[in-house]
Amino acid sequence: MSIKFGKLTKFEGVDFRRWQKKMHFLLITLKVVYVLSTPCPEETKDETLEATRHKSKWENDDYICHGHILNAMFDPLFDTYQNMDSAKELWEALELKYMAEDASSKKFLVSDFNNYKMVDSRPVMEQYNELLCILGQFMQHDLKMDESIVVLCIIDKFPSAWKEFKRKVKHKNEELTLVELLGSHLCIE
């Protein structure tokens, strides 16, 4: 198959959700993702030619799916998971291990956001973009926070030199969105 794909980063054991979504898209594109959720067709005594073809196609697609998942892993992980019998077994083993690790990383994300402090010595826009990166990871982990709370938290994180700006923005009557904070206020300052 000579389909050109964007480069899929090999899975190293971190950022599983991102890798999983990219891998899932690749498997959908290859039309083999169904083997992750569909059991192998059972063999019967009076199997028809159609049933034999169906089973053979499933086995071939499982082999392709299994191979692509393994191929998208760094060698130490490949060595660990290569002996799994099916793509579904491999996929479930990865989810079991790395989704649990993702759950603990949620706690660290929240902590990173809460403890982030902007400093006077670096450009505010650069630091603002770092905060947006952390918030982007929130969405990857299905962590939700009301936008008005996010905006107020970011305003509180501005460096001490922005004291007057913080006071002015906090005393406005209307609530700001992240886009409004960036567009109409940060760029102006």
Image (tube, helix red, strand yellow):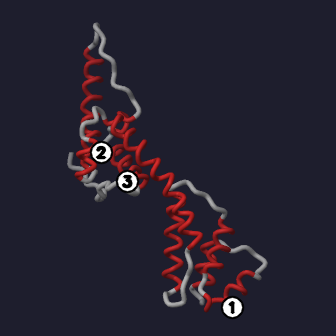
**What residue is shown at x 39% (from left), y 49% (from top)?**
20
Q: Which residue is mark 2?
A: 69
Residue under numbered circle 1: 164
Tell me which amino acid carries mark 2. Ile
Q: So how many labels did they put on this image?
A: 3
Q: How far is disc 3 from disc 2 in space, using C-alphas?
A: 10 Å
Q: For the residues marked 1 and 3, what is the alpha-carbon distance in whole angstroms?
A: 43 Å
Q: Where is residue 159 drawn, in percent x and y?
A: 59, 86
Q: Earlier in the sequence, mark 3 or mark 2?
A: 3
- Residue 146 lies left or right of residue 140; in this view the side is right
| Residue beneath the point at 52% across and 62% down | 108
Lower sequence index among marks 1 and 3:
3
Q: Secondary structure at mark 3?
A: helix
112 w.r.t. 26: above or below? below
Q: Are marks 1 and 3 in contact (CB under 8 Å)?
A: no
Mark 2 element type: helix
- Foreground residue among 93 and 56: 93
Q: How far across and how far down the image is residue 177, in percent?
A: 65, 72
Name the secondary structure under disc 1: helix
Q: Amino acid at mark 1?
A: Glu
Q: Quadrant of the N terminus?
A: top left
Asked if 17 appears above or below 181 in the picture, the reply is above
User: What residue did someone put label 3 on?
Assistant: 19
Q: Quadrant of residue 172?
A: bottom right
Question: Would you call the spot at circle 2 few (<14 residues within 10 Å), some (14-19), or many (20 or more)?
Answer: many
